[in-house]
Image (cartoon, rainbow, N blue to C red):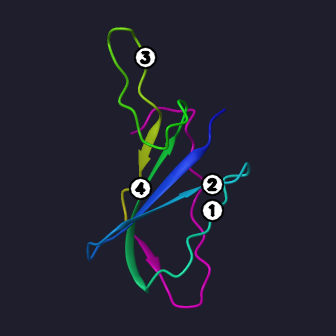
Amino acid sequence: DAPVIVEVRSEAGGEVRVVVADAEGAFTVDRLAPGPYRLRLFADRDGDGRWSGGSLVPYRPAEPLRILPDPVTVRARWATELEPVDFRTPSP
């Protein structure tokens, strides 16, 4: 029901790359150097492009957030596929 924002950060540090997943959940991050990356995904329900932790007054729930527990390894000239991420169930 909301765009999914994907934040990609190299384990070596550096800038965070941000992309929006399409309606099927697919996304592309171009020109990544080979190596391990950490991914954080959230449903951008308020449309501001940033994760919101919600508020108590007025009550607004936090936007669904998932942080992949393991780094994703990117190889040169290879597509990398991830397991589906479900925002409908609570995070473990």
Residue under the image location 41 percent in, 39 percent down: 51
Q: Which mark is residue 60?
A: 3
Q: Is residue 36 left or right of residue 20?
A: left
User: Magenta region's main secondary structure?
Assistant: loop
Q: Are marks 1 and 3 in contact (CB under 8 Å)?
A: no
Q: Position of residue 84 (x, y in %)?
A: 60, 54
**How many C-alpha atoms fall within 10 Å of the one at disc 1: few (<14), some, or many (≥20)?**
some
Residue under the image location 36 percent in, 57 percent down: 69
How far, Cα to Cα, is label 3 from label 4? 25 Å
Q: Which mark is residue 27?
A: 1
Is residue 8 positioned above or below 92 on the image?
below
Is residue 64 positioned above or below 67 on the image?
above
Q: Give amino acid for label 3.
A: Arg
Helix, strand or loop under label 1: loop
**Residue assigned mark 2:** 21
How far, Cα to Cα, is label 1 from label 3? 28 Å
Helix, strand or loop under label 3: loop
Residue under the image location 48 percent in, 80 percent down: 32
Tag nearer the camera, 1 or 4: 1
Most distant residue in the top direction? 58
Q: Earlier in the sequence, mark 1 or mark 2?
A: 2
**Residue assigned mark 4:** 68
Q: Does the magenta run of residues contain 84? A: yes
How far, Cα to Cα, is label 2 from label 3? 24 Å
Q: Are marks 2 and 4 in contact (CB under 8 Å)?
A: no
Q: Give amino acid for label 4.
A: Leu
Most distant residue in the left direction? 13
Helix, strand or loop under label 4: loop
Q: Is residue 42 left or right of residue 3?
A: left
